[in-house]
Image: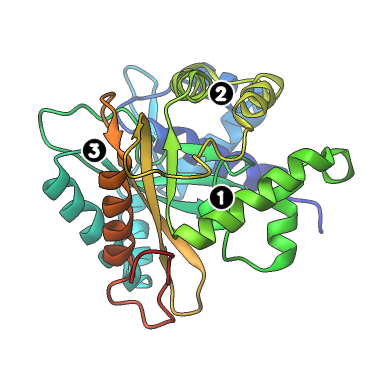
Amino acid sequence: MSRPALSALRALEIIDVMAGQPSEKFTLSDIVRLTGTNAASCHAILNVMMQRGYLLRDPERKTYRLAPVMVAIGEAAARHDPLLAQAKRVAADWAERSEREVVLTARAGEDIIGVAGFAPARIPNTSVRVGQRVPLRAPLGGLFFAWADADEQAGWCSPDDDETPFAVRAAHEAALALLRERGFLVSLRTVEHGAFTRQLVQAQDEGLAESRLAVLLAAMDNGLYQPSEIEPEAEYRVQTLSAPIFDRHGRVLYNVGVVYPAEPVSGEDLLQEGYALVEACNAGWAGERIIRKGAE
């Protein structure tokens, strides 16, 4: 792989930071701190981005924000991706039907990015925000890899290559197999999951060290924190119920995630909702539909 152009990488990091906090404006010091760029280089990059119309600068407060050209770029991207309209429609319809928060995410390189969020007015948005990035690293993002080719699956199951313990790799492989069988992911509420979610907010506002991130992911690393069996008569404390949306080539482009309240849900209801969400996500897809055990 060729060496990345550092200035281009820093410019993309600046866009990512601002997209993840769209209501904020950033000083030069803020951007330096959040991207790890030295002040002189950062100032030069910001000037180029302003000249090209990607950023606007408040002359009084000396803060920066994304410019309207980014809206045009987003509209152009949406025109090239008709599947996005379907994904948004599924997420919006499910939020209205279930009266729960629903988050639409996509794969963005080595991250998962928030694409859209829908929720009744009485429910605050508590999950991934639009534009926010989350590391696409096991155990996160299994839905984007469960139907991928063998090499991609192997890379996700062994994020540290030869240093990944065999037991961890085997647990990830089993988790992907379970996702393919069910067609959806049930993420249970756990202390580790809650800690990671809280740290995401801090990561956006203050930055999160890679070492701390690795510790949090390792704590969550228990087979995608999904139940190995869903018993109809049992009760489960669910964090999210998620299902993939495929393109015509069978690749997972989007993930629809339904955020559950703290109250337990019966296994019977959870199974029914999981199968129904998969059916909604499969609607209109030209490829082979997912067949799940018990869903016929």
Lower position in the chain sequence, tag 1 or tag 2: 2
Q: Are marks 1 and 2 in contact (CB under 8 Å)?
A: no
Q: Are marks 2 and 3 in contact (CB under 8 Å)?
A: no
Question: What is the crowding at mark 1: few (fewer than 14 residues within 10 Å), some, or many (at least 20)?
Answer: many
The residue at the far front in this view is 233
Q: Position of residue 9 (x, y in %)?
A: 64, 44
Question: What is the crowding at mark 2: few (fewer than 14 residues within 10 Å), some, or many (at least 20)?
Answer: some
The image shows residue 55, relative to residue 219, as above or below, that is below
Q: Which mark is residue 142?
A: 1
Lower position in the chain sequence, tag 2 or tag 3: 2
The quarter of the picture where residue 296 lies is bottom left
**Badge 3 element:** loop
Q: Is residue 279 left or right of residue 217?
A: left
**Badge 1 element:** helix
State how far apart marks 2 and 3 are (Cα): 29 Å
Q: Position of residue 243 (x, y in %)?
A: 39, 55
Q: Which mark is residue 101?
A: 3
The residue shown at (37%, 83%) is: 286
State how far apart marks 1 and 2 are (Cα): 28 Å
Q: Is residue 127 visible?
A: yes
Q: Which residue corresponds to mark 2?
A: 34
The quarter of the picture where residue 171 lies is top right
Task: Name the colour scheme.
Answer: rainbow
Q: Nearer the viewer, residue 149 or 70?
A: 149
Q: Position of residue 115 (x, y in %)?
A: 36, 49
